[in-house]
Image (cartoon, rainbow, N blue to C red):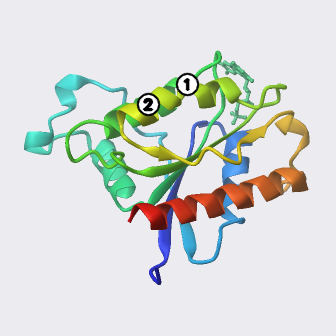
C-alpha cells in the first residue's frame, strides 16, 4: 500500500499533566513509516443522551459530529487510557458510546491499539480487559500483542514529556507496527 495511513490517537484523560496523554504523545513519535497520527480530544463531548442522538436528522450535538467525522477518517485508532476503578474512565466510554451508534458508526470494523499508563503496579490491565467486550460488540479488531501496560508511569517521563523507559518505547514501536500491518490486512 502506498497511501499514508491515518491513525487517530485519543487520550482517555482530560487533565493537563496526564501520564496517558504523555504516553500518547510519545507514541506519536514512534510511528512506523507510512503512518501519521491525528490527535483528537474528547474534552468537549457532552454526556450521552439518546434524545440528542438523532442520526436521521443529522442533529447530534456538533462536538459529537466533529468527533465522529474525525474517527471516520481514521484507518485505525490508538486509545491510550487510564484505569479508573478497575475499568474504562467514564469520559472515554461516553465518547465511545456516542461514536458507536448507527450503521454508519465510524468504530465498526476498525483496527485499534489500546495502551495505558498508571502510577500503580498493574499497568491498566483491568481497564484493557474491560475493553474486550466493547471491541467485540463493535466488531473492532484490537492488536493484542505486544501489550503496553505502563506501570509506575509517574517515574517514566522526563520533565519535557520524553518517555525514559526504552523497553516500553520498543513495545510501543512494535505495537504500532502491528497496527499498521493489521490495517493493511483488513483493507
Ligand atoms: C476515579 C479514579 C479511579 C482510579 N482508579 C484506578 C485504578 O483502578 N487502577 C489504577 O491503576 N489507578 C487508578 N487511579 C489512579 C490513576 O491511575 C492515576 O490518577 C493516573 O495518573 C490517571 O491517569 P492520567 O495521569 O493520564 O490522568 C484512579 C484515579 C481516579 C481519578
Q: Is 103 or 25 nearer to us in this picture?
A: 103
Question: Which one is nearer the viewer's eye here, 137 or 51?
Answer: 137
Which residue, as the protein is rendered here, is positioned at the far left?
57
Relative horizontal placement of residue 110, taking residue 149 as reference (left or right): left
Q: Would you call the spot at circle 1 few (<14 residues within 10 Å), some (14-19), or many (20 or more)?
A: some
Query: How far across and down, in percent of the image, does residue 175 sit?
Result: 67, 55
Q: Is residue 34 visible?
A: yes
Q: Quadrant of residue 58?
A: top left
Task: Give 2 or 64, whichever is nearer the viewer.
Answer: 2
Q: Position of residue 16 (x, y in %)?
A: 68, 41
Q: Which mark is residue 130?
A: 1
Tag 2 residue: 134
Mark 2 surroundings within 10 Å by alpha-carbon count, few (fewer than 14), some (14 through 19), many (20 or more)? some
Question: Disc 1 and disc 2: Cα gap in Å?
Answer: 8 Å
Q: Residue at x 36, y 32 (%)?
A: 137
Q: Quadrant of residue 173?
A: bottom right
Residue at screen point 27% across, 24% down: 49
At horizontal 62% and vertical 37% (from top left) the residue drawn is: 81
Residue depicted at x 83% and y 38%? 153
Which image quadrant: the C terminus? bottom left
Q: Is mark 1 within 8 Å of ligand 1?
A: no
| Whole-percent x, y for residue 7 in the image | 51, 61
Amino acid at each position: 500500500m502506498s497511501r499514508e495511513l491515518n491513525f487517530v490517537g485519543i487520550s482517555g484523560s482530560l487533565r493537563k499533566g496526564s501520564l496517558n496523554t504523555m504516553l500518547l504523545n510519545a507514541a506519536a513519535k514512534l510511528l512506523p513509516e507510512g503512518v501519521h497520527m491525528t490527535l483528537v480530544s474528547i474534552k468537549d463531548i457532552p454526556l450521552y443522551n439518546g434524545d440528542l442522538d438523532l442520526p436521521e436528522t443529522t442533529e447530534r450535538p456538533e462536538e459529537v459530529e466533529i468527533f465522529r467525522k474525525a474517527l471516520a477518517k481514521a484507518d485505525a485508532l490508538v486509545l491510550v487510557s487510564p484505569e479508573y476503578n478497575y475499568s474504562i474512565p467514564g469520559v472515554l466510554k461516553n465518547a465511545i458510546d456516542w461514536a458507536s451508534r448507527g450503521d454508519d458508526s465510524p468504530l465498526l470494523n476498525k483496527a485499534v491499539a489500546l495502551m495505558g499508563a498508571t502510577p500503580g503496579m498493574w499497568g491498566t490491565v483491568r481497564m484493557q480487559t474491560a475493553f474486550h467486550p466493547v471491541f467485540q460488540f463493535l466488531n473492532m479488531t484490537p492488536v493484542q500483542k505486544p501489550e503496553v501496560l505502563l506501570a509506575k508511569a509517574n517515574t517514566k517521563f522526563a520533565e519535557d514529556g520524553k518517555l525514559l523507559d526504552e523497553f516500553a518505547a520498543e513495545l510501543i514501536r512494535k505495537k504500532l507496527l502491528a497496527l499498521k500491518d493489521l490495517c493493511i490486512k483488513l483493507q
